[in-house]
Amino acid sequence: MGRSITVTQANFETEVLVQSFEQPVLVDFYATWCGPCQILKPMLDKLAQEYDITVAKVDIDQNPDLAKAFRVEGVPDVRIVSQGQAREGFVGVLPEPQIRELLAELGLTSTLEQALDTWATVQASGDQAAMQTALTELLIQYPESPQILLAAAKFYLGQGEAAIARQYLDLIQSADRSIHQQVEGWQELLALQESLTMLSEDSALEASYQQGVQAVLAEDYATALETFLTLVQKDRRFRNDGARKAMLTVFKLLGDEHGLTAPYRKRLMQALY
């Protein structure tokens, strides 16, 4: 895990040049009046929590000599210093995935991604005690990570602890659209789970609906979507169009890029119109 610090002319040599022999340093030349700089700042702060890097923030108005030495002409301007040598980084605001690609070129990997891979391995083991221990450690290490908080919500929902799952979902704050969609999806899934206690009068359709919800909870999304689609085709009025709404929830859980989302969206539209 790295760090984010403020650097001036006085401590530049120690915090950037000397530090760069221990880990790469991203020097973020910025200005307080610069709008794009304010967009980039939280992005770099987030990455500093995941990667073994130092993000050194330099206010060009307070440190004009540093800006001149690095020939900074516009901000934000990010340079990379490694082993005492500076190289070009990027000017302006790059999308986060592109900054991650840049870090990968430096041979760096995200400790958060490594932790999530470890979590997936523990999950696959099915060992509930090991899962609980691993999740507790992750939450201590990454208390604000949307991915870890989502993992906690999923875990506790699987344990039948809906109230705890909802608490973790409520803690998630992210401007990432895909994360926002997943949070909405899991919140709606909690509502779906709660809906199982409210039985409808049509026992045959109700049995199918409950099977669909159970499939979602088991993350068997193909079965869930097929079950809900069949219900949509049979009776749109069932549970106040509940099967269609359930499919929309699954789409949020999967995200737009998942292989099931596009074909089932198309099939749903065909069934509706």
Image (cartoon, rainbow, N blue to C red):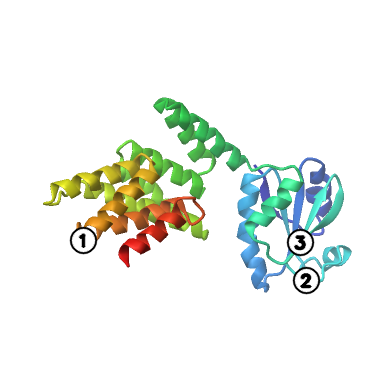
* Sequence-first disc among 3 and 2: 2
- List the residue tagged with mark 3: 90
Q: Is residue 268 left or right of residue 232?
A: right
Q: CA distance from mark 3 to mark 1?
A: 52 Å
SS assignment at label 3: strand
Q: Amino acid at mark 1?
A: Asn
Q: Nearer the viewer, mark 2 or mark 1?
A: 1
Q: Does residue 197 show up? A: no
Q: Is residue 56 left or right of residue 238?
A: right
Q: Which mark is residue 228?
A: none
- List the residue tagged with mark 1: 240
* Sequence-first disc among 3 and 1: 3
Percent coordinates x, y for residue 104 in the rendering: 72, 46
SS assignment at label 1: loop
Residue 177 drawn above or below residue 108: below
Q: Residues within 10 Å of mark 1 (few under 14, many from 20)?
A: few
Q: Quadrant of residue 214?
A: top left
Please name whichever residue, 183 or 263, is drawn nearer the observer in this view of the structure: 263
Extreme left residue here? 201
Q: Nearer the viewer, mark 3 or mark 2?
A: 3
Residue 77 drawn above or below residue 35: above
Residue drawn at x 37%, y 63% is: 269
Q: Does residue 260 show up? A: yes
Q: Amino acid at mark 3?
A: Phe
Please name whichever residue, 250 or 154, is drawn nearer the observer in this view of the structure: 250
- List the residue tagged with mark 2: 74
Q: In what quadrant of the picture does the C terminus appear? A: bottom left
Percent coordinates x, y for residue 131 in the rendering: 44, 30
Q: Amino acid at mark 2?
A: Gly
